[in-house]
Amino acid sequence: MSEAAPVVPYNKNNPFLAAITENRPLSKPGSAKDTRHFVINLAGSGLRYQPGYSLGVFPQNPPVLVEQLIARLGLDADAGLALPDGRTKPLRRVLREDVTLNRVNKKFVRAVAERLPAGRRDELLIVSGNEAALDDYLYPRDCLDVLDEFPGASFTAAELVASLSRVNPRLYSIASSQAKHPDEAHLTVAVIRYHTGGRDKKGLCSGFLADDAPLNARTLPVFLTPNKHFKLPDADTTSVIMVGPGTGIAPFRAFLEERETRGATGRNWLFFGDQHRATDFLYEEEFEAWRRRGLLTRLDTAFSRDQAHKIYVQDRLREHGAELWRWLQDGAYFYVCGDAKRMAKDVHQTLLDIVQQHGEMSLAAANEYVSQTLMKDERRYARDVY
């Protein structure tokens, strides 16, 4: 009797079809942002994650955009297209699930140019032939924008799909502890919304989750991505300092749920920031409850637009630099999650300043302590930035 074939684990190439069971706003009425909390049901997947992991989500294009593109090109939405694995799939589903429509690529622009009458072709080729100009042209446009500006191009279904980028999954830091929510993964998502080319548009994955993904239907392809260097200390007695403005708060909600469930005795210090306390204090009730119960030893917030002078998390770090230095000297871990371009750089510089000032070190010694000792040797400084 032959042995049963091993179970294939779910991964990026074989995602699990999960269900969204909750989609609720975190930002309050009057906020300039649309930030949501999602609960993803993983029951039956066997997927196991630790705080600090990310959930990969395969998004879909908005149905309206798909139908508009099909109509613009006069294509048959139900025409079958051959897939690399030998299956056939209707054009409508391929455009929904397999390609990217909201961010047009260079290949598509050049394919449109090749299909235009001579005069318009030259006009678009001039743009597509200059890399800097092409990048500027591409940034605010989707496929429909290009076809609106340069009408007349004709594609077969196969040619259209071949000119488009394959869809890539988006990775979101998991905002829950599986010890507390055995069959769930929670996400904290800022929904991207903007208006260009005379139309309202949205981020591919954030817009899909917020507006188009059905509730309680196992149709959401997901997988886990471990993060070996962004995890809680092994010892539950170790203190942690967490800096997570905006949606960067996600993994720290997971950290705190995990530490609460495990009965960890290490101190927890959270820095959170956003625009306005009244509308943008994500998970306020939970964090305040943890502070009252003592799980959160310290909670320092920075709401940048609640006063004339903008205050950010790095300003709060600097204000409490002496205490932060004492925590580091006592063995605390230091975590940062969120925007890589500005916030994480500013926080890193502030940490260097604190170490230099309160550790009475030279700039070179502070750099060595932060970048070598904390980050590499002791792995007590970890970042999850994007």
Image (cartoon, helix red, strand yellow):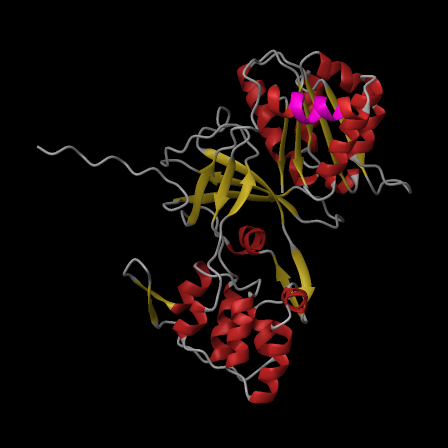
Residue farthest to the bottom, as pictured: 118
Q: What residue span does the magenta drawing correspond to?
A: 366-374
Identity of the residue drawn at 60% across and 78% down: 125
State left or right for residue 363 relative to residue 185. Answer: right
Query: Which quarter of the figure is the C terminus placed in?
Result: top right
Q: Position of residue 341 (x, y in %)?
A: 70, 44
Q: Is residue 202 above or below residue 75?
A: above
Q: Is residue 313 above or below residue 201?
A: above
Identity of the residue drawn at 47% across and 50% down: 58
Q: Position of residue 67 (x, y in %)?
A: 49, 71
Q: Is residue 236 above or below residue 21?
A: above
Identity of the residue drawn at 71% across and 49% down: 33
Q: Main secondary structure of the magenta part?
A: helix
Q: Is residue 334 visible?
A: no
Q: Is residue 271 above or below residue 247?
A: above
Residue farthest to the right, as pictured: 308
Locate residue 195: give its quadrant.
bottom right
Q: Position of residue 207 (x, y in %)?
A: 58, 55
| Residue 373 magenta | yes
In front of the other: 240 or 216: 240
